[in-house]
Image (tube, helix red, strand yellow):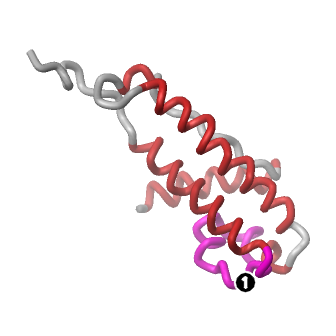
Amino acid sequence: AALARLVLAVAWLSVVATQLLPLPEVAYQFEELEPCFHGMDARRHHQEVFGHHVERFNAVLHQLQHTAAYRSILKHGGIDDLLRRLREVPRALQRRVRQHAGGYVNHELFFRTLRPCPSGAGNDG
């Protein structure tokens, strides 16, 4: 839990500095996941689905910059704080924040903890 908070805090610092949350890179080649996990599907999910959440979350963050929620939560907190204090976000943006900030956190955790398939795994012989 502490490592996850640190990773999100580092990602958040880049948002505050650049106003854009990047699509995190993975620490492995997608092909290294096979045969335990289909590498091409993992790559597509990372780029398209995770990328979609990053793009949409950035759009919501841009809208939030001019709200009291930005001043009270985002300037001094992280994504986890934003989700915990969702009621302080303008009602018109709450659904998108929940969907895309939550999607970002879930996908970041998934791809950060995914590891290459151990050698010999998945072989029947």
Q: Toward which corner of the image does residue 97 lie, by quadrant?
A: bottom right
- Quadrant housing the N terminus: bottom left
Sort mark 1 into few (<14), some (14-19) or many (20+) by Cα contacts within 10 Å. some
Q: Is residue 31 above or below residue 8?
A: above
Camera-nearest residue between 82 and 101 = 101
Q: Is residue 58 above or below residue 95?
A: above
Label 1 SS? helix
Q: Toward which corner of the image does residue 84 lie, by quadrant?
A: bottom right
- Quadrant housing the C terminus: top left
Assign the magenta stretch its main secondary structure: helix
Camera-nearest residue between 6 and 115 = 115
Camera-nearest residue between 30 and 70 = 30
Where residue 22 sits: x, y (%)?
Answer: 70, 42
Residue at the extreme bottom: 87
Residue at the extreme right: 66
> Mark 1 sits on what residue?
88
**Residue 97 within the segment the image draws in magenta:** no
Q: Amino acid at mark 1?
A: Glu
Camera-nearest residue between 95 and 67 = 95
Where residue 23 sits: x, y (%)?
Answer: 65, 40
Residue at the extreme left: 125
Residue at 71% across / 66% down in the picture?
Answer: 96
Residue at 52% across / 49% down in the picture?
Answer: 107
Where residue 37 sits: x, y (%)?
Answer: 35, 31
Where residue 116 sits: x, y (%)?
Answer: 35, 28
**Residue 83 within the segment the image draws in magenta:** yes
Residues shaded magenta: 72-92
Residue at 29% across / 29% down in the picture?
Answer: 36
Q: Is residue 81 above or below residue 33?
A: below
Using residue 60 as the reference point, say whether residue 113 is left or right of it. left
